[in-house]
Amino acid sequence: MLMFNQGCVTQRSVPFWTVGNPLVDPFGGAVLPKIDSLEVARIIAWAAHEGYCEATSAHDDDLVPWNPEQPEDDLDPSSPVYRKLRELKAILDEAGLSFNTITCSLHGNTLFRNGGLTNPDPELRRLARLKVERTIRIGHFFGARYYTYWVARDGFEVPAIVDWKEVYNWLADGLDHVYDYIKEQKLDNYVGATVEPKPNEPRGQMFLPTSGHAVGFICGKLKHPEFWGVNPELLQHESMALLNAVMTVGYLCSMNRLSFLHFGCQIKAQFDNDFPPLIGPEGLKETVMMFVALREIGWKGVVEYDCHMLRAEGDPNDSIGCRKQFIKDSTRALGIALALAERIRPQELAKLTQSAADLTSIVQMCALPEPRLTR
Ligand code: XUL
Ligand code: MN
């Protein structure tokens, strides 16, 4: 069996927000106690020591609190934020973790309930921009490879009051500012920035719903398209829009835009399930075929578990233990998916009919003997 770093997956990343997740849903409160970011860092460091992951990622808010009155507290050595960032970095460094992406939370604080970069209020867009700048500086401190823009609350429920003439200009201005700020400040840890599309949730409709929309926007509207890629969330976000993960990675690779993967499992056309990889009633074939496609294309990159444990398995009496188990399960699932993908040999299927090729790929994937067909 291939080790994770011999195939297409260069690093396995466990983001702060997935480990810290207290398992709230719209119908019930937190199952797990909220834990401090230092505790989250220690769990991810544990996972790195155990050999389950090599990288992490975070929103600014996952690491330190944000106070709109102090937009530059990260630069002030006497601030608690400054100190906390250093404590966090010491834990990650000691565990040898690299930092995949930093992303600005423009969804958590209720100030941004009607959008971040596309908020119709210019004062809130200005505040969002300052928060993005601070997040970019925090990412620089951790040596993040990417800055990620997740579409978050940039969306709408009421089309009649969206400023359709301006809204995509505001979005482009906000993203162009990410590039300008990184270059002006000479933050050369960043190899690029990414857009993470999502069709809905938390908004009824979001302004960059799919990977196709994201690539179109990057190539057609941003000033520095070469700096921008996409991190699709597969299976979740594309499956919510009834799209197929194999096609998404094929398309993004052909456009040279697949920066890294957010990884988990999803029931098609549902709300954002964020099931751990391979967990749930569907998605096995799609997940495995996605890795077959990535292998055949020759893509290599980071796979980041962006999901959470099932709410039903959160254990308030062992809230650290179940969080560790979630990481272990996700890494196990990725290992299973890669091992199954390794068995599938498209070259041997080429001359078969489509149905025979599909069935033979299943026989290959499951390492089955050919079933007996006759009595
Ligand atoms: C939400 C989602 C986010 C982004 C980061 O669905 O995927 O967690 O990945 O903001
Ligand atoms: Mn995601």
Image: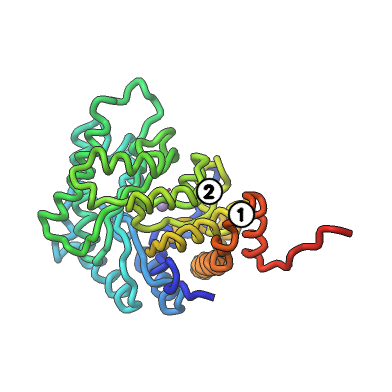
Residue 168 higher or lower than 368, as above or below: above
- Relative horizontal placement of residue 239, taking residue 101 as reference (left or right): right
Name the kind of residue labelled 2 in the image: Asn
Residue drawn at x 19%, y 58% as measured from the top left: 137
**Marked residue nearer the N-terminal end (2 or 1):** 2
In the picture, the disc for residue 280 is 1
Residue 134 found in image quarter: bottom left
Toward the viewer: 229 or 16?
229
Which image quadrant: the N terminus?
bottom right
Label annotation for residue 11: none
* Side of 66 relative to 319 (left or right): left
> Pointers 2 and 1 in contact (CB under 8 A)?
yes
Image spot of residue 358 (x, y percent): 63, 54
Crowdedness of circle 2 by 10 Å Cα count: few (<14), some, many (20+)? some
What SS does tag 1 mark? loop
The residue under the point 20% across, 49% down is 178
x then y, percent, for residue 117? 26, 40
Which color scheme does this rendered protein use? rainbow
Q: Disc 2 marks which residue?
A: 273
What residue is shown at x 63% (from left), y 55% (from top)? Answer: 352
Residue 372 seen in render:
yes
**In-image side of 298 versus 288 (left or right):** left
Work out whether 83 lies above or below 192: below
Q: Name which quarter of the figure residue 8 lies in.
A: bottom left
| Amino acid type, residue under disc 1 in the picture | Gly
The kind of secondary structure element at disc 2 is loop
Residue 206 placement (x, y as % from top left): 38, 36
